[in-house]
Image (tube, rainbow, N blue to C red):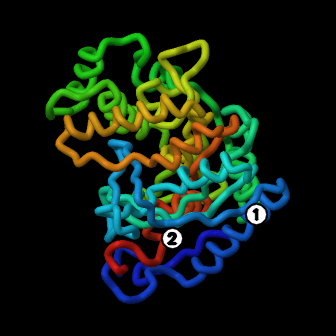
């Protein structure tokens, strides 16, 4: 299946707020084919498809993720929260003995609305028992290549590199061997004018402003920043060994304590997937959630209820595993050669 060359009248950007499905209706068939292909990929590997709740009495405490709430689903709680990921339920299933599993899950995040963000979107999330981070990285690449061929493209050129190597190549410094003040100086040199940033915030700024634009290998046409032949555009990049401050739910690196077993997959500079060799220590996980809430207080954000069901499940025994979440709309956008998720979603925040 190849990208449809829709007219301006059919594009999402010209129809925002309309009651109509934004874009050519062939997108519905392309999405259905993509989801069917994903299910076929995992069926061949005997990975179980599951369905988990959208509403929960607990929330994701991650400071970088905006959470949407609703009326409580139980009388004893003040609010319920729309899931930002099915991760916590998946880990409870893993601790219950469900084995390898995946879900194509609708999720919700109160994020900035951009060409890569919509408050409601779809995550493909899966977990593999006894996989280390590198094995799951290989499976992510295998899935991407499989889907690209299924949709009529050639295999994607993919490079793997560490977080340190990436910064040294594109930003000119080792992120693990530089002071916070020096990183902040780098941010100011690239236009940052706000209050002091934390180490994580400063590195994220350099990544987004300095590094990420250099990773977007999409060719440009004379008419503007439009993707050309889908078989020629962009390249894939697998980044691994992130700073320990960015661990979230990942294990710390056993030999390099300033790093964690986390990876991201980018296509043409766009993040598609984020994965971990999963933390299994319930005490450490509780401490990380509590630290999230302390950081929230410092930033003037509301604290959020910690998922004690997840902590209990981990206490009972979360098996060694690795897991990854992949944005389906971003994946479809990349596979079909579009520049915005609006072009593949049809219904977004503006016409929901």
Q: CA distance from mark 2 to mark 1?
A: 18 Å
Extreme residue in the bottom direction: 19
Q: Is residue 210 above or below residue 313?
A: above
Q: With respect to residue 153, does 24 lie above or below?
A: below
Quadrant containing the N terminus is bottom right
Q: Residue 278 appears at what percent x and percent y?
A: 60, 36
Q: Residue at x 25, y 30 (%)?
A: 190
Label 2: which residue?
344
Q: Nearer the viewer, residue 203 or 338?
A: 203
Q: Residues within 10 Å of mark 1 (few under 14, many from 20)?
A: some
Left or right, 214 with reference to 46: left
Q: Label for residue 150? A: 1
Residue at 36%, 12% (x, y): give it. Answer: 178
Question: Does 346 sit left or right of 180 as displayed?
Answer: right
| Residue located at (33% from left, 42% from top) | 63
Decide if residue 118 is in sight here. no
- Exactly how many numbered labels are in the figure? 2
Q: Residue furthest front?
A: 76
């Amino acid at each position: 299946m190849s990208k449809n060359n829709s007219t301006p009248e059919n594009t999402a950007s010209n129809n925002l707020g309309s009651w109509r499905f934004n874009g050519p209706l062939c997108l519905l068939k392309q999405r259905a084919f993509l989801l069917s292909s994903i299910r076929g990929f995992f069926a061949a590997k005997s990975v179980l498809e599951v369905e988990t709740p959208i509403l929960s009495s607990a929330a994701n405490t991650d400071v970088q993720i905006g959470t949407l709430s609703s009326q409580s689903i139980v009388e004893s709680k003040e609010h319920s929260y729309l899931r930002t990921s099915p991760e916590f339920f998946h880990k409870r299933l893993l601790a219950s003995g469900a084995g390898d599993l995946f879900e194509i899950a609708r999720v919700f995040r109160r994020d900035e609305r951009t060409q890569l963000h919509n408050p409601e979107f779809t995550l493909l999330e899966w977990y593999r028992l006894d996989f280390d981070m590198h094995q799951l990285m290989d499976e992510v690449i295998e899935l991407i290549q499989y889907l690209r061929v299924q949709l009529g493209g050639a295999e994607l050129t993919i490079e793997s590199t560490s977080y340190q190597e990436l910064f040294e190549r594109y930003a000119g410094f080792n992120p693990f061997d530089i002071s916070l003040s020096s990183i902040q100086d780098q941010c100011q040199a690239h236009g940052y004018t706000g209050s002091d940033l934390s180490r994580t915030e400063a590195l994220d700024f350099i990544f987004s402003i300095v590094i990420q634009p250099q990773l977007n290998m999409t060719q440009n046409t004379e008419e503007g920043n439009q993707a050309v032949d889908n078989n020629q555009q962009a390249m894939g990049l697998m980044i691994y060994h992130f700073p320990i401050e960015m661990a979230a739910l990942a294990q710390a690196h056993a030999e390099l304590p300033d790093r964690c077993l986390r990876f991201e997959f980018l296509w043409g500079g766009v993040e598609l997937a984020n994965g971990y060799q999963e933390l299994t220590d319930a005490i450490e996980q509780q401490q990380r959630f509590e630290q999230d809430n302390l950081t929230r207080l410092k930033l003037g954000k509301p604290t959020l209820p910690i998922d004690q069901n997840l902590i209990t499940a981990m206490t009972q025994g979360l098996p060694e595993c690795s897991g990854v979440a992949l944005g389906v709309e971003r994946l479809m956008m990349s596979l079909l050669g579009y520049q915005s998720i609006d072009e593949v979603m049809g219904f977004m925040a503006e016409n929901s």
